[in-house]
Image (spheres, helix red, strand yellow):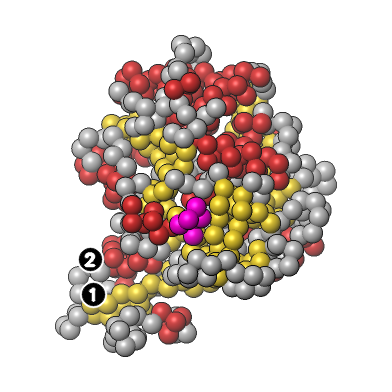
């Protein structure tokens, strides 16, 4: 079994059923089955894509994104979902690292694609506007018996502490395992309709909002616009969505909205970032449906734990491990710790990645003795509920997306006159966190803050650009020369 054959089986069991609602359009399973096969054949015959080749997807949310993902898998290739907020320079690094020579995108990104082509001359682009030709295409695709559960299915690029993202290697088996566990714990059935409001490049959305509903014969309500939040509710009511996965900022916005009668939702799931207790309390006070917090990371396909739908839900906790996944709290020597002892959260199960693409040293640090060391710090209580008390060193979460200060700092250092740079996170009620930069200047130089911010916006995704840049005579450092970010966090901006 692999993801492509599992989807084809689901589609052929539900050919006329609506797989995706997109505004006023409805796309049946048969449509996606035929487009999947067409995309697979197009990639193989027209672009020479072979089994194991990496194919990028750089798209905003649209129905064709799903056809692209499934078509790549059906061709036996490896899908590389790319954050559509990234700038061409950032995408070029991923394309180079993963040896991507074929990229699926659309005409709306024409300007960015031209710049990307200039940075990677071997790149060939497939426009999704051509997919309409495959709506009724029935030629068989790749022999699916050739694609094994152990074959790579997806490379998910996550921000790295070295300033460059790393590609987490997820196999067909990893993702099928996570889908199976999520189906059990979320009590997913074929009448469920998942409201998809976040970008599909996010591993949380890819597994929980795309693969899960499609492999169980459910439906996806692909929300066209998330602003204002009432437009989300309109789509949920219009298409009778039953499950809403999202990030804390979404539920914070909804907690202050009036709840119309006849709400079709049965469950809301918060992931990708810690859920503030205040948000959970406000939401629970107004909404007649459960909001459960879960935890995961791209390296685990991504879901690791969740508060149970039935039974005890503990505010502030990320719940219990999902079926067939183990969580252990370990000290720096790798010894398992007891109840209420704080250590590193480690994960074991069929959902755990096989490693980082072309990064043996990083893989060896993360995968030890069969466990994935997440870098997150936490403990578990007497009933096995897990609590995250700290996060990976220095990492920020902006709108649920990992941001590492080192990546921003390295770009700041490229600006003329910068002597020192450090980036920290500041709490933000709308985005969760926002970067804040501190710099010191070389002698004879002064800083034009607007010029630096313009420079950063041209080279970094908008959510990575600091909201302010503060100039200091010098940055505080310890005896070994390391910048004391704890001191910077106490400075008012």
| 2 and 1 marks in contact (CB < 8 Å) | yes
Residue with the mark numbered 1: 418
Numbered disc 2: secondary structure: loop
Residue that protrudes farthest toward the top in the picture: 139
Q: Which residues are magenta?
A: 368-373
Residue 174 percent across, percent down from the top left: 52, 41
Marks 2 and 1 sit apart, C-alpha to C-alpha, by 8 Å
The quarter of the picture where the N terminus appears is top right
Residue 353 percent across, percent down from the top left: 47, 46
Residue at 40%, 18% in the rendered image: 41
Residue at 39%, 49% in the rendered image: 356
Location of residue 225 by image quarter: top right
392 falls in the magenta region? no
Whether 296 is drawn above or below 15: the answer is: below
Q: Within 10 Å of the Cα at label 2, are there few (<14), some (14-19), or many (20+) other Cα atoms?
A: few
Location of residue 467 by image quarter: bottom left
Residue 12 percent across, percent down from the top left: 62, 18
Residue at 44%, 33% in the rendered image: 151
Whether 300 is drawn above or below 143: the answer is: below
The answer to which of 287 and 422 lies nearer the viewer is 422
Residue with the mark numbered 2: 414
Q: Within 10 Å of the Cα at label 1, are there few (<14), some (14-19), or many (20+) other Cα atoms?
A: some
Whether 393 is drawn above or below 93: the answer is: below
Whether 105 is drawn above or below 436: the answer is: above
Residue at 35%, 74% in the rendered image: 422
Is residue 111 among what the camera can see? no
The answer to which of 483 and 177 lies nearer the viewer is 177
């Amino acid at each position: 079994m692999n993801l492509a054959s599992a989807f084809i089986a689901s589609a052929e069991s539900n050919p006329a059923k609506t797989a995706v609602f997109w505004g006023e359009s409805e796309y049946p399973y048969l449509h996606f089955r035929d487009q999947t096969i067409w995309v697979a054949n197009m990639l193989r015959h027209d672009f020479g894509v072979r089994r194991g080749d990496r194919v990028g997807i750089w798209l905003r949310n649209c129905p064709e994104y799903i056809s692209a993902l499934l078509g790549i898998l059906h061709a036996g290739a490896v899908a590389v979902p790319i954050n559509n907020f990234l700038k061409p320079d950032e995408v070029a690094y991923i394309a180079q690292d993963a040896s991507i020579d074929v990229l699926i995108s659309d005409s709306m990104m024409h300007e960015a694609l031209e710049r990307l082509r200039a940075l990677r001359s071997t790149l060939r682009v497939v426009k999704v506007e051509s997919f309409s030709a495959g709506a009724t295409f029935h030629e068989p695709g790749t022999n699916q018996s050739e694609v094994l559960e152990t074959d790579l299915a997806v490379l998910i690029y996550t921000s790295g502490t070295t300033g460059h993202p790393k590609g987490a290697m997820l196999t067909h088996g990893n993702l099928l395992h996570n889908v199976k566990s999520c189906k059990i714990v979320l009590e997913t059935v074929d009448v469920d309709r998942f409201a998809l409001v976040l970008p599909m490049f996010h591993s949380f959305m890819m597994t929980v909002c795309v693969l899960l509903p499609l492999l169980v014969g459910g439906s996806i309500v692909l929300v066209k616009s998330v602003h204002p939040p009432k437009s989300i509710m309109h789509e949920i009511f219009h298409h009778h969505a039953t499950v809403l996965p999202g990030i804390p900022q979404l539920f914070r916005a909804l907690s202050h909205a009036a709840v119309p009668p006849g709400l079709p939702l049965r469950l809301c799931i918060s992931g990708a970032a810690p859920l503030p207790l205040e948000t959970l309390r406000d939401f629970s006070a107004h909404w007649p449906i459960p909001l459960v917090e879960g935890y995961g990371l791209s390296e685990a396909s991504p879901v690791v734990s969740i508060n149970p739908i039935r039974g005890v839900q503990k505010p502030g906790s990320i719940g219990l491990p999902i079926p067939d996944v183990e969580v252990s709290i370990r000290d720096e020597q790798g010894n398992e710790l007891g109840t209420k002892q704080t250590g590193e959260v480690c994960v074991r199960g069929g959902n755990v990645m096989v490693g980082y693409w072309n990064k043996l040293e990083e893989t060896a640090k993360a995968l030890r003795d069969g466990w994935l060391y997440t870098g997150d710090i936490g403990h578990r209580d007497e009933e096995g509920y897990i609590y995250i008390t700290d996060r990976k060193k220095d990492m920020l979460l902006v709108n649920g997306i990992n941001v590492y200060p080192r990546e921003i700092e390295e770009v700041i250092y490229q600006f003329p006159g910068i002597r020192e740079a450090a980036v920290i996170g500041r709490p933000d009620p709308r985005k969760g966190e926002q970067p804040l930069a501190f710099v010191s200047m070389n002698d004879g130089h002064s800083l034009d803050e607007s010029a630096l911010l313009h420079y950063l916006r041209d080279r970094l995704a908008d959510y990575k650009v600091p909201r302010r840049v503060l100039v200091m005579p010098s940055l505080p450092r310890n005896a070994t020369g390391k910048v004391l970010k704890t001191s910077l966090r106490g400075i008012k901006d």
